[in-house]
Amino acid sequence: MDRGLYIAASGMLAEQTRQDQITNDLANSSTPGYKADRSMQASFGTMLLENTANGQAIGSLGLGAQITSTYTDLTPAPLKQTDEPLDVALDGQGFFAVQTPAGPRYTRDGQFVVDGNGRLATATGYPVLDANGRTIALGGSDGLTIDTNGVIQRNGRTIATLGVASLTNPVKQGDTLFAGAAGPRPTGTAVRQGFLEGSGVDPTKAMVEMITSLRTYESDQKAISSIDETLQKGIQAGGV
């Protein structure tokens, strides 16, 4: 393969991956507790070009680009007041624990509901766990208060304490859920009833990144078209 074609094609593949990531972030720009992804690009390296006649150095040529890694930005987003009794946010680091068919998972999305069994659950139906790893039976949302330590009470009677954990090596699992090794509750983290953490996506910044990526992709396309035209002219000239 012509080296120029390979370089341009590798750049297009890298930008496709980047665009998929940005598109997913934009789709979740209003999802409570969502954390944006970031893609890291790097070149494969460079090759020194020399004049074959006298060995004189001409310069260097890049060998293409690739996505080297994608990571999740876990920076806490600003809290938004909703005054809903089952909306809960974490002011600081940490995650709420929930039970899924695949085992315990963790989320920053505190938009909770009472499910058909009277348990505290996520909006997608996963039961929320207490500090001892058990589901929380509420029966209803009337008269509930949740203090900054996550203690749930009704009429002065303690029902449960929300499970809040630190997480080592968190990995996205979808639906704002993360997997990872759970640890103790982070120091200084407070639970805020009647609040939700906003999305970690800045829509304006994400749109600028998308436009930049599209322009780069189009430039690589034009490079491939130009190289293809040059190769066709060379073939035609050689056949004359």
Image (spheres, rainbow, N blue to C red):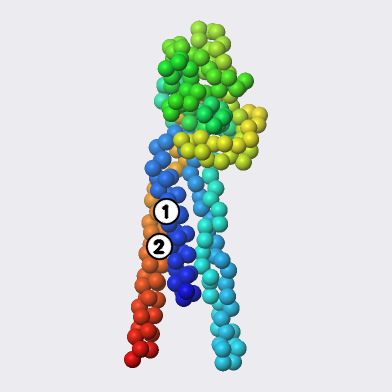
- Contact? badges 2 and 1 (CB < 8 Å): yes
Q: Position of residue 101 (x, y in %)?
A: 52, 29
Residue 98 rendering spot, x and y as whole percentages? 53, 27
**Which residue in the structure is indicated by mark 2?**
217
Q: Which residue has dot 1 on it?
A: 19
**Viewport quadrant of the C terminus:** bottom left
Vertical position of residue 102 compared to residue 130: above or below: below
Amino acid type of the residue tagged 2 in the rendering: Tyr
Q: Where is 5 relative to 131, above or below?
A: below
Pinpoint residue 117: horizontal percent, then vertical percent.
45, 15
Which image quadrant is residue 97 in? Answer: top right
| Left or right: residue 54 compared with residue 22 | right
- Give the structural element (helix, strand or loop) at label 1: helix
Q: Residues within 10 Å of mark 2 (few under 14, many from 20)?
A: many
Residue 194 disc label: none
> Could you tell me how many numbered marks the image carries?
2
Q: CA distance from mark 2 to mark 1?
A: 10 Å
Whether residue 156 appears in this view of the structure is yes
